Image (cartoon, rainbow, N blue to C red):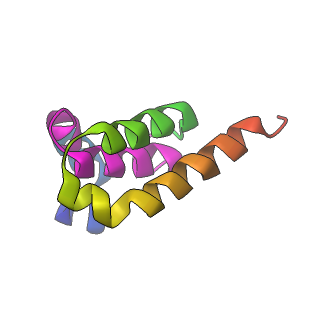
Amino acid sequence: MALFTRKEYKKSNEFFQMKKGESAKANYYLGQMFEFGYGTKKDLKKATKYYAAALELENSRFIKSLVEEIEAAITRVDEELKKPK
């Protein structure tokens, strides 16, 4: 997470990609990266996928602390996807 905080997004993306199958936190940060275009092309569909994966993983300690924030992020992305282009 320190890489993400220091805005080292390429290294963060590589690390989170390795951990996405086991870490809700990695999926959450990948969602952030794709939602806001941090070190990657902005992709709201991928952001939603990673936020949903974060919710599905059984990392209850992290999930409990971020459920509201993740749900808000999914809602935010869904609303933006519905906007006419």
Image point 23% across, 59% down: which residue? Answer: 62
Residue placed most toward the observer, 5 or 24 = 24
On screen, residue 62 above or below 14: below
Q: Is residue 68 left or right of residue 54?
A: right
Q: Is residue 7 visible?
A: no
Along the line of sight, the residue nearer the viewer: 76 or 63:
63
- Where residue 24 appears, as percent x and y from the top left, is 25, 47
Q: Residue at x 31, y 38 (%)?
A: 56
Tell me residue 45's x, y (percent).
54, 31
Residue at the farthest right position: 84
Q: Residue at x 30, y 61 (%)?
A: 64
Q: Position of residue 40 (x, y in %)?
A: 43, 41
Identify whether 44 is placed above or below 2: above
Magenta-drawn segment: 16-40
Report the side of 47 relative to 84 (left or right).
left
Q: Position of residue 60 (x, y in %)?
A: 21, 54
Q: Main secondary structure of the magenta part?
A: helix
Relative placement, left or right, of 61 versus 13 is left
- Give the answer, above or below, for where 62 lies relative to 22: below
Q: Quadrant where the C terminus lies? A: top right
Q: How many marks?
A: 0
Q: Is residue 69 magenta?
A: no
Position of residue 22 relative to residue 37, above or below, is above
Picture quarter with the N terminus: bottom left
Q: Residue at x 53, y 35 (%)?
A: 43
Magenta stretch: includes residue 26: yes
